[in-house]
């Protein structure tokens, strides 16, 4: 099992980042490279939760999103073709005195088959940079989207 911890600082408020994270409409793949619009299926959507299947490149997972705590979003893996056990994502937000927000992300990858175990091992070691870059790109994409909404 791999646990990957990442950190970003953004000009977004926690509410703005959560709005991007929980926007399951068309164009999601512009914000999240690992979430193809063609593979996205929203099973249930509430005010502070969602049940969504998403993925790309032949890897998919069904996630239970919970954003009932305004400083934290949890995404628990319900089903996947390679992830099981304790897999999921947690985003924690802290407002800073200078108006920025720090974002701490934890991704847990518990492979349920050989492909998952190998992929998790790679992500936990040499592949961590791929996830760090993906998070950075997501933050920048949501910032750009927010800037266009504000103009």
Image: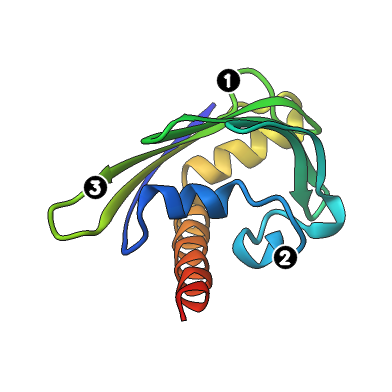
Q: Nearer the viewer, residue 72 or 90?
A: 72
Q: Percent position (x, y) of residue 52?
A: 75, 37
Residue 47 lies in what quarter of the image? top right
Q: Is residue 64 left or right of residue 5?
A: right
Secondary structure of the residue carrying tag 1 is: loop
Secondary structure of the residue carrying tag 2 is: loop
Q: Earlier in the sequence, mark 2 or mark 3?
A: 2
Q: Is residue 120 left or right of residue 56?
A: left
Label 2, label 3: how many angstroms apart (C-alpha)? 27 Å
Q: According to the image, label 2 marks what residue? A: 27
Tell me if mark 1 has few (under 14), some (14-19) or many (20+) residues whose alpha carbon lies within 10 angstroms of its own. Answer: some
Q: According to the image, label 3 marks what residue? A: 95
Q: Are the residues tagged 3 and 1 within 8 Å (C-beta)? A: no
**Mark 3 vs mark 1: in front:** 3
Residue at the spot 62% in from the left edge and 58% down from the top edge: 32
Q: Are the residues tagged 2 and 3 within 8 Å (C-beta)? A: no
Q: According to the image, label 1 marks what residue? A: 86
Q: Percent position (x, y) of residue 23?
A: 64, 52
Tell me if mark 2 has few (under 14), some (14-19) or many (20+) residues whose alpha carbon lies within 10 angstroms of its own. Answer: few
Secondary structure of the residue carrying tag 3 is: strand
Label 1, label 2: how many angstroms apart (C-alpha)? 29 Å
Q: Residue furthest bottom?
A: 151
Q: Earlier in the sequence, mark 3 or mark 1?
A: 1
């Amino acid at each position: 099992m791999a646990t990957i911890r990442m950190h970003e600082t953004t000009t977004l408020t926690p509410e703005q980042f959560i709005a991007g994270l929980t926007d399951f409409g068309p164009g999601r793949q512009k914000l999240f490279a690992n979430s193809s619009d063609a593979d996205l299926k929203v099973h249930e959507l509430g005010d502070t939760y969602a049940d969504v299947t998403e993925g790309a490149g032949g890897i998919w997972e069904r996630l239970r999103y919970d954003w009932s705590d305004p400083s934290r979003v949890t995404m628990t893996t319900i089903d996947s073709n390679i992830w099981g056990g304790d897999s999921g994502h947690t985003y924690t937000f802290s407002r800073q005195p200078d108006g920025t927000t720090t974002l701490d992300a934890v991704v847990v990858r518990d492979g349920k088959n050989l492909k998952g175990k190998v992929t998790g091992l790679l992500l936990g070691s040499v592949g961590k940079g791929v996830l760090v870059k993906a998070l950075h790109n997501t933050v920048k994409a949501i910032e750009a989207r927010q800037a266009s909404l504000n103009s």
